[in-house]
Amino acid sequence: MKVFENRLYRDDIACAAGLNLPWGKLQDSSVLISGASGLIGSALVDVLMYRNDNYDMHCKIYALGRDRKKAEDRFSYCWNSTYFEFASGDVNQLPVINNMGMMDYVIHLASNTHPVAYSTDPIGTITTNIIGTGNLLEFAANHDSRRAGFASSNEIYGENRGDKETFDEKYCGYIDCNTMRAGYPESKRCGEALCQAYIAQKKLDVVIVRFTRSYGPTMQMDDTKAISQFIKKGIAGEDIVLKSAGDQYYSYTYVMDAVAGLLTVWLCGKCGEAYNIADAASDIRLKDLAKVIAETSGQNVVFELPDTVESAGYSKATKARLNSGKLRALGWKARYDIRSGIVRTLEILKDLK
């Protein structure tokens, strides 16, 4: 069974597609999505295709990616649809789409997003976030896009200085920039600055979403984030391996809540503004997250030291909780807290085994 065939996941898609948003902006439009096969990108495509199939939205989706075979497997249900087209390409090169005039929207989601990728491909991590972002913004400007969206990260805030419980969009914490691991947060910061440059110089309409640590049934099986490793152990019926004391206190977001936040910003956000996508009910310490997944899957939590490659990619922030008041003011509300999101993720993924 594929994830898009699962009843619970299809319910998630239907709920996101039925949100009270100004969907008319996407009627008879076109959108280029980079990172379309990823955790959030694939769920976004599923929601848009559901709108096409059930609401006659007629939104043409161009899914930009490097791996055609992977994309064809993931989107087999819509591969031959009039409203879906795979665009083969690397974001580090300016996208080329044949016979393309105007592209109404460009959503840039492609990025290395987990510790092993940060440590084994630090150059690619930086270039995707800077050169790739510049290319997607340039493409949007060249194709008269109505709006571009940039996926930023909670990591741009750095380490909590001890003066705030949660980070609003104006907060700026400490990042030791003279380290390899700084490549990810610093390049995301640079990506945001590029967005502002295109707004100022080319009058491009751009909005920015700052995702937290997202998870859900569309996760990639090679993802090495702690929560992804915990989930993989849970569905395999193995003990949950904690590779630190687990005192890190972070915000998390279920994938379809993240997609709902992205759609809200895309359709309702203000040009040039950044929006945190987070919910206080999903703020949790890493050791407690491991416990939730262990309890849900009937396993135990065990401790194990990480290897040097993996540990080199770990975030240095120990307390990073986001304030989502700005997004909630646009009408967004999370459907899942951390426990219900984990339960749903495990239930769906176990059904796919």
Image: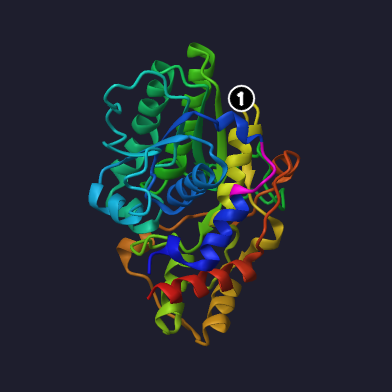
Identity of the residue drawn at 32% across and 36% down: 127
Residue corresponding to mark 1: 271
Q: On screen, 210 above or below 234? A: above
Query: Any magenta on residue 24?
Result: no
Residue 329 as seen in the image, left or right of residue 206: right
Front one among 176 and 129: 129
Residue 124 as seen in the image, left or right of residue 298: left
x, y (%) of residue 96?
Answer: 27, 26
Front one among 240 and 64: 64
Task: Check disc 1 and give the amino acid type.
Answer: Cys
**Residue 11 appears in the picture as rendered:** yes
x, y (%) of residue 171?
Answer: 65, 39
The N terminus - image quarter: bottom left
x, y (%) of residue 53?
Answer: 49, 46
Identity of the residue drawn at 61% across and 45% down: 261
What is the magenta range? 17-21
State how many labels appear.
1
**Residue 174 appears in the picture as rendered:** no
Identity of the residue drawn at 45% across and 16% down: 144
Assign a secondary structure to mark 1.
Answer: loop
x, y (%) of residue 158?
Answer: 55, 46
The C terminus - image quarter: bottom left
Q: On screen, 199 above or below 219? A: above
Number of residues whose C-alpha sits closer than 10 Å to that of mark 1, classed few (under 14), some (14–19) or many (20 or more):
some
Tell me which colouring the rendered structure shows.
Answer: rainbow
Q: On screen, 235 above or below 252? A: below
Q: Quadrant of residue 130?
A: top left
Front one among 123 and 86: 86
